[in-house]
Amino acid sequence: MKIHISVDVLGLPYAAIVTTANTSDIKGGVAMFSQPSFHPFSTIKTALCDGTYEGSNFADAIFELIGAKVEVAKRSELYKFAVIPKRWIVERSFGWLDKCRRLWKNCERKIENTLNMVKFAFVRLLLNRF
């Protein structure tokens, strides 16, 4: 299973979707942005994505759905670690999800259960933070 999340600059979730492993990242990203719960956030001007979401098909679909342009944050060098300021925001959010016992490894049988555990993990994070 693949987890696709959309977060703000603080790492707090806007939307999340879980797809099967054979779904491409681009199709999963478009499905996440086309959720009915995502439409109130139409004030988003730029969607920052990693290199797997690169391509004009994805950028055109996102612009058509929510009117935002897509900006791809790529790594600087392949074998050298460097913190890219904008890219670590989503990576940090996935790190927070990995602290949950049922999400650090794919142990759920149903996609709905995984999505609910992602929601519970973010609720727990918000309650601990505020």
Image: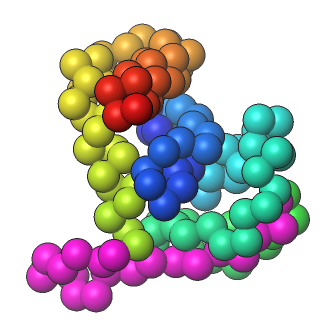
Relative height, residue 53 to residue 114 (above, below)? below
Q: How many marks?
A: 0
The residue closer to the viewer here, 84 or 52, is 84
Query: Mostly what secondary structure, the magenta segment?
Result: loop
The residue closer to the viewer here, 96 or 5, is 96
Q: Position of residue 104 (x, y in %)?
A: 24, 29
Relative height, residue 92 to residue 84 (above, below)? above
Return the residue found at the far front: 130
The image quadrant where one finds the N terminus is top left
Where does the magenta region start and end?
A: 66-85
The residue closer to the viewer here, 80 or 97, is 97
72 part of magenta stretch: yes
Report which quarter residue 95 is drawn in. top left
The residue positioned 62% from the left and 40% from the top of the image is 15
Return the residue found at the far left: 80
The residue positioned 67% from the left and 44% from the top of the image is 32
Q: Position of residue 33 (x, y in %)?
A: 72, 49
Q: Is residue 80 left or right of residue 60?
A: left
The residue positioned 48% from the left and 45% from the top of the image is 12
Q: Is residue 105 visible?
A: yes
